[in-house]
Image (tube, helix red, strand yellow):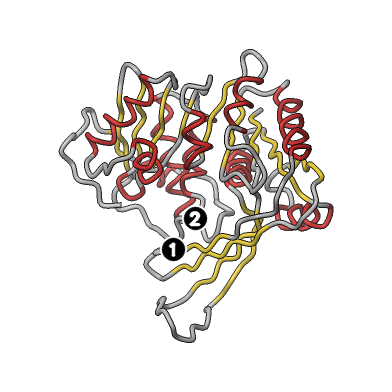
Amino acid sequence: MIVTVTPNPSIDRTLYIDRLDRGTFIRAARSSSEAGGKGINVGRALTTHGVPAIAVVPASAASGAVLRRLLGDTATLDTVAVRGEMRTNVSIVEPDGTTTKINETGPTLDPADETALADAVLRQAASSTWIAGCGSIPPGMSSDFYARLAADAPSGVRLAIDTDGEPLRASVGARVALLKPNREELERLVGRSLPTLGEVVDAAAEIVADGTTQILVSLGADGAVVVTARSAVHGEAPGAPVVNTVGAGDALLAGFLACGADTAALPEAIAWSVAACASAGTEMRQATAADRALVVVHPTIDRSRRLVS
């Protein structure tokens, strides 16, 4: 089983429009509401593909009821009772797949909430192989929450972290088996622009040298790269259809963990991401043979390749 934790879950409201013009009246062609948060998305992708998973989230009784109603049987939740209502995030999607996101901050959690959340994760981890710590840290929580989870995890349980900013920085080398930043998050972590594939690989290698076992970097239309102390592998799915990019990185992480979390897992992880991009909202469909056929894993890294996304 894989346990995910989402310290800052949300209701994800997606609006589909013809074109985003600032300062004008825009009528949405359609809309949807889904349970959101990166760990919830990872759990949903795993469940969709038949991989046992449980998503641990802080939520009031009212918020927890909304999450369960929206999720149905697509993911299993373990809710930790807190005060304050869940945030609402809005994604505005244009016909070409361009997505504009507006995220609320989320409720403030106190030290007792943080302890209860960590305890719930570690309790579930007793029967799991991975803990995936996903998403932003809400107000009031310590920026090293994920790093302390890594330190306290049972022997044999590995930690994957998908976050940004100080929580990501605190997780480097903190007994973490996998970091999954996107390109922009990696740039903020190393403090410089990474315009080429070679520079992304070099930056990821620096983080690995600091103690993290491996890094999976999502690169949008340029695919993804896995970097370990011994190797770097780049894969992509050129020409894959894009309906909505929300949840694509979460599906990538889910597929990577489900398939062994090594360089050999990259093609299937990318196929899961392709399936997510072809799905409306974050309720992704299963990856198909057609999705897998789009994936290309390159025998060598094209270090001079300039990234477009």
For mark 1, what is the residue? 99
Q: Which residue is at a point 29% across and 41% down the rendered structure image?
A: 192
In this view, which residue lies farthest toward the right? 61
Q: Describe residue 98's horizontal placement relative to residue 27 as left or right.
A: left
What amino acid does circle 2 point to? Val
What amino acid does circle 1 point to? Thr
Residue 45 x/y as whole percent: 58, 43
Q: Which residue is at a point 27% across and 44% down the rendered structure image?
A: 193
Q: Is residue 231 above or below residue 222?
A: above
Residue 175 x/y as whole percent: 53, 19
Residue 210 x/y as whole percent: 39, 20
Q: Which residue is at a point 42% across and 70% down the rendered structure image?
A: 94
Quadrant in the picture for residue 208: top left
Name the element at disc 1: strand
Mark-to-mark CA distance, 2 and 1 = 8 Å
Upstream in the sequence, badge 2 or badge 1?
Answer: 1
Compare residues 145 and 96 and report the one nearer the observer. 145
Compare residues 5 and 206 and report the one nearer the observer. 206
Q: 10 Å neighbourhood of mark 2: few (<14), some, or many (≥20)?
A: many
Q: Describe residue 131's horizontal placement relative to residue 274 as left or right.
A: right
Q: 10 Å neighbourhood of mark 1: few (<14), some, or many (≥20)?
A: some
In this view, which residue lies farthest toward the bottom? 25
Locate the N terminus and report the quarter of the image it occupies: top right
Name the element at disc 2: loop
Residue 246, numbered label:
2
Q: Which residue is at a point 43% across and 78% down the rendered structure image?
A: 18
Q: Is residue 67 above or below residue 56?
A: below
Q: How many marks?
A: 2
Q: Describe residue 221's horizontal placement relative to residue 277 as left or right.
A: left
Q: Describe residue 233's horizontal placement relative to residue 15 as left or right.
A: left
The reply to whether discs 2 and 1 touch (Cβ–Cβ < 8 Å) is yes
Quadrant in the picture for residue 31: bottom right
